[in-house]
Amino acid sequence: MDKRLIAERFARARATYSREARVQQQVAERMMARIQSVLPDFLPRRVVEFGCGTGLYSSLLYETWHPELLYLNDLCPEMELCLRNLTAHHGVTFTPGDAETCPLPGGLNLLTSCSTLQWFDSPNRFFQRSQSLLADKGILAFSTFGGNNLYEIRELTGKGLAYPSLQELETWLSRAGFHILRMDEEEVTLTFPTPIDILRHLRMTGVTGTSGHTWSRGRLTTFTESYFERFKTDGGVSLTYHPVYVVTQK
């Protein structure tokens, strides 16, 4: 995983991410709903969100619980500019760094993220690290994506991330000492007028899924024709997201 490239891509997209990231906003809302469904009386005082991005999920965390500590972390230092309204509140801070290796606060009631874990080199090792960061009975809750995520792009370009299955996630979490409170998945299909609009959408969210792919005019024409041929819908062409939601307890 090229973390430098990932950081550059999301930094470039930060001005357009919140407007374009419709699925990610929905995922953030549904992640919060899942935590509250299994932990209706949960009132975390010490919270870390890793991969906070422009703050879609961060705002929900603050508005829902007003924790004493809301420690926001992201790989991109530039995200601090998007979080000024949040970090103006007492107890809300932002620190950039790679969550897999950088220092994070301990004694946490909640360690959480949305749409981030798929960019990690080793989610398995991060789950093991999470044990040392959480207080007794602390919650690790996250969303990531499953194997059908952006499958249209992968099938046409051969480029895409390797997503763990639910079974792999369950095995890693259990070995790390977590009790799974809830784990489920869904598929969300968006429709765009043309394949070019899909590429623009992915670029504006920083999630191209085609790292290293060079778009010559001929290749772009072939991609567009193939996309229409294979993934045409009544309203244009489809793009599939495959969110996975996990709530666990130490």
Image: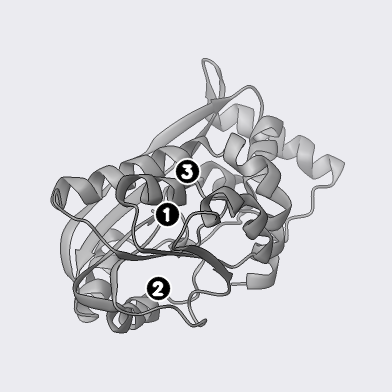
Asked whether residue 11 is in view, the answer is: yes
**Extreme-right residue of the structure:** 217
Q: Indicate whether 72 appears above or below 199.
A: below
Circle 2 SS class: helix
* Amino acid at the residue labelled 3: Gln
Circles 1, 2 touching at the beta carbon (< 8 Å): no
Colour convention: one colour
Q: How crowded is mark 3: few (under 14 residues within 10 Å), some or many (20 or more)?
A: many
What numbered label is drawn on residue 114? Answer: 1
C-alpha gap between disc 3 and disc 2: 20 Å
* Amino acid at the residue labelled 1: Cys
Question: What residue do we see at 68% from left, 31% from top?
Answer: 197
What numbered label is drawn on residue 24? Answer: 3
From the image, state whether disc 1 or disc 2 is nearer to you.
Answer: 1
- Give the mark nearer the N terminus: 1 vs 2: 1
- Percent position (x, y) of residue 182? 18, 55
Question: What residue do we see at 51% from left, 65% from top?
Answer: 93
Question: As rendered, which of 48 and 182 lies closer to the eye?
Answer: 48
Question: What residue do we see at 73% from left, 53% from top?
Answer: 12
Q: In which quarter of the image is the N terminus?
A: bottom right
Q: Indicate whether 197 appears above or below 102.
A: above
